[in-house]
Image (cartoon, rainbow, N blue to C red):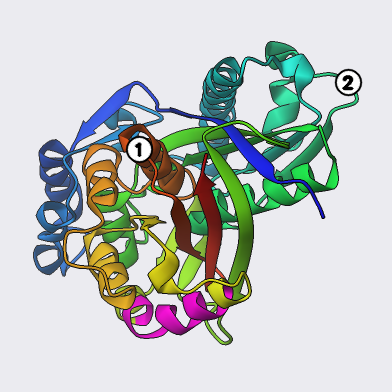
Amino acid sequence: MSPPVALLALSTASPLNCLRQDEVAVAARTLFQDRFPGFDRMAPVFSSAGIDTRQSAMPMEWYLEPRRWPERTEVYLNVAVDLFVQAAKRALDEAGLTGGDVDTIVTVSSTGIATPSLEAHAMERMGFRPDAARIPVFGLGCAGGTTGLGLASKLARATPGGVVLLVVVELCTLSFRMEDLSKADIVATALFGDGAAACVLRSGEGGFARIEGAAEHTWPDTLNIMGWRVGDTGFGVIFDRAIPPFAKNRLRPAVDEMLAAQGLNVEDVDRFICHPGGMKVIHALESALSLEPGRLDHERAVLAEHGNMSAPTVLYVLDRARRAGLPAKSVLIALGPGFTASTVSLSAT
C-alpha cells in the first residue's frame, strides 16, 4: 500500500496594491460608460459581486492607460516571481524546511507566459538545488489550485520521502483592458484580483491534513464557457454567463462520481472548500451540493477581501478553514476551463 501524503504547510501572498471596490466602480464608469453602450446595465455587478477589496499587481492608475502585451508580460514576470518567492518561503518556513530541501517544484499559472518559467527565475532566490525537478503547468485557470494540489500529491506519493513544493501564482488584473470591450471584460473588472499560494507536501505522516485522493471531470462540448482569448494587448477573458446555472444543474452528478471512486458520497464530507468564482457561483455551489444557504462562509470572506484570484483562491479558502479548525473530512472543489471540475479529498490530522 502506498504511503499517505501529508500536507505539511500552506501559505498565501498578496501584492501590496489595494483596489477598493467602490473606487474601482467609479473609475470603471468614467472609463467605460461612453465606450460600452450597455455599461449602465452591467454596472450593478460592482456592488453585487460580494467584493470589498482586492489586491493588484500594479496601482489602479497603471490600468487606466492602454497597455500592450510586452508591458503586461514585463509586469507579470516581475510581480509573479516576487509573489512566488514570498509564498514559497513562508510555506517552507512553516514546514521547517528550506529551498534546498525541495525535490520537486510544481508551478501553476495561467495569467502570463514566462519561458524560462517562474520557478527557474526564482531558483537562486529560493536556494533550490540544481537537480530539483521543475514542473510548470499552464492553462488550468480557476481549477489550478485544486488540480495542482492533486498533481503535487501524486508526485509526492510516487517519490516516498521527497519534498514537493506547489506554488500557484495568478495576476488576473493584467487582463483588464479598455479597448474591444465585451460583457466578460466588464465582469472581469469587477471580480479579478491577484495573489499566490504555496503548499509543501511529503509522503508519510505529519502536517495538518492528509491528502486522500484527487479527481477531475471534464464535460464535453464546453470549451467556450471559460478561458482566454488572445489579442494584440494580451489575454482577454472568456466568461459565459451560463457558469452559475451550469454549476447548479450539472455539478452534483460529477461530484457524486468523483467521490464514489474514493468510496465516498456527499454525506460523508464534513466541509466542502470551494473556489468562490463570484457570489452567483457560491449560491450555485451551495444549491448543487445541498448545503444550507450561507454555509460557504470562508468562501464569502475570501471573495470579499481578495476577489477572484483564479487558481490560488481555493487555497486561500483552505488556509482560512484550517485556521478555524479543519473537520475530519473535507473536499476542495474548483471549476475551470475545459470545462472541468476538480476535487481533492483531505482528512484532518
Residue 79 visible in this rendered orientation of the protein: yes
Dot 1, how many residues are within 10 Å of its Cα: few (below 14), some (14-19), or many (20+)?
few
Q: How many marks?
A: 2
Q: Between residue 2 and residue 49, name the one nearer to us.
A: 2
Percent of width and height locating residue 39: 15, 63
In the picture shown, does residue 14 fall above or below 330? Answer: above
Percent of width and height locating residue 283: 23, 68
Residue on which the image places disc 1 = 325
- Range drawn in magenta: 246-258
Q: Is residue 282 left or right of residue 88?
A: left
Residue at 60% x, 69% y: name it: 216
Could you tell me if the residues under marks 2 and 1 are in contact, i.e. CB atoms within 8 Å? no
Majority secondary structure in the magenta region = helix
Mark sitting earlier along the chain (2/1) = 2
Residue on which the image places disc 2 = 130
Q: Is residue 31 left or right of residue 219?
A: left
Whether 71 is among the magenta residues is: no
